[in-house]
Amino acid sequence: MAEDSDLEKTEPASQRKLDQAREDGDVPRSRELATCTILLAAGGGLWVTGDNMMRQLNHMLMAGLTLDRGQVYDFELLSARIAGNLGDLLLAFAPLAGLLMLVALASPLLIGGWLFSSKALMPNFGRMNPISGLTNLISKNALVELGKALGKAAVVGTIGYLVVSKQFDAVIGLSMEPLQSGAAHLGHMMLTTFIAIVGGLVLIAAIDVPYQLWHYADKLKMTRQDVRQEAKESDGNPEIKAKIRQQQREMAKRRMMSEIPTADVVVTNPTHYAVALRYADGKMGAPRVIAKGADAVAARIREIAAEHNIPTLEAPPLARALFQHAELGDQIPETLYTAVAEVLAYVFQLRTFKKHGGIRPVLPDALDVPPQLDPHNPAFDIARTAAAAAKAAKAAGDVAPDAPAPANAVPAASATVTLNTRTTP
């Protein structure tokens, strides 16, 4: 059942598939809308310019049937006369023709928009398959087109009958009118009937446009498998991305390990965490974390430090605080300056002792590490909860800008550190 549901086209088309269909020349179109707009434009144009056009045509007809003796016997004069009459005829129809051309170009903007696709011009021999042709004759789309054709015939026939029957007496009376006025009256009645019938086609177009949009969306629907496959193609295969991230982590780990020989000291937990620090007086504003890790990585950091005679100091609270709040390559938090300064002072004194002898420095055993920075201290959870509550209250607008900080909150200098809510194992 799950496989069947994955193969059913139930998902709307993605933007990528819509763009691909448009590149292939497949966009929603309504022939009824295009026909209706052109016919309405023709009827409106005849209604506005019809009288002037008839006068020009009447004048050209009279002038065309009037020839002098020179034009009858001189072919060049007759040709020039005919060319002039043709030019006048084109000028008479130019406003209506220009209007129809403009509407024909603008009507695609109503649905689908303008589209220029060379793929639509390529020959498709699949359309010559007689089996596919027979299948299309009995398809749902063919039944819809048949229904539209019958609907158009019914609408046009009904409106034509009603309009003509209403003007039946006027049509009979045309024989009693003078030629010029009768012709004008007949043209007016024909134009009225034409506009009425075209107006009825608006109903067909109003039904066809939503159907074409729905049919186009339904035709481009995708299965769930298609959606997943497209996501893989667009965003990349999750397995490949996972391998890339793994390789990036390994590269970063190798770079980190290569930095350990330049460290001044490695602070350990002693077994779970290890953080390598480096400080260059005059070049760095504060000591930087050049390597850190937990468990197996921490063990490897200690091994490399031992291989290169890097001092290792066991300070569990400081190691946990550095691992939690100091990112790789960043300076240590300001609230840990005092504790790290004691460690570095011990390391530098130890170097001097090894080179020149003297009194061996005392190993620091009571480092000043704020309890709210140690993940294993209850104050850490209290400070984190208070900071999260203050942040949520500020976002909701319930805390004034100058409101006092909670009792357990960390000082402003280390606020950015305590907001780090990463969970330490």
Image: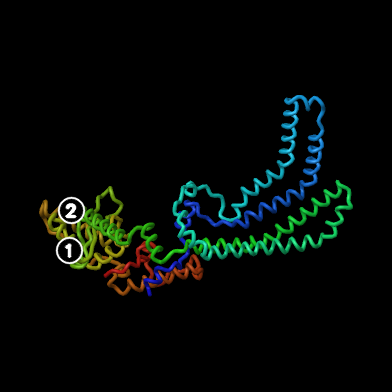
Which one is in front in this view, the residue at disc 1 or the one at disc 2? 1
User: Tag count in the figure?
Assistant: 2
Kind of residue at badge 2: Pro
Q: Residue at x 69, y 51 (%)?
A: 41
**Residue placed at 62% from the left, 54% from the top?**
34
**Colour pattern:** rainbow
384 to 357, vertically: above or below: below
Indicate whether 269 appears above or below 254: below
Is residue 324 or residue 17 the one in the foreground?
Answer: 17
Where residue 391 appears, as percent x and y from the top left, is: 44, 68
Is residue 310 among what the camera can see?
Answer: yes
Q: Quadrant of the N terminus?
A: bottom left
Residue corresponding to mark 2: 261
Front-most of 250 and 203?
A: 203
Coordinates of residue 121 in the picture (x, y in percent): 49, 47
Amino acid of disc 1: Ala
Q: Is residue 80 above or below residue 223?
A: above
Under tag 2, what secondary structure?
helix
| Between discs 1 and 2, the one toward the N terminus | 2
Give the labeled residue for mark 1. 299
CA distance separating discs 1 and 2: 15 Å
Q: Residue 385, percent across and down?
A: 38, 72
From the viewer's side, name the closer residue of 134 and 219.
134
Q: Is residue 310 left or right of residue 374?
A: left
Q: Could you tell whether 234 is left or right of 44 in the image? A: left
User: In the drawing, does residue 259 fall left or right of residue 181?
Assistant: left
Rendered-image quadrant of the C terminus: bottom left
Query: Which element is circle 1 on?
Result: helix
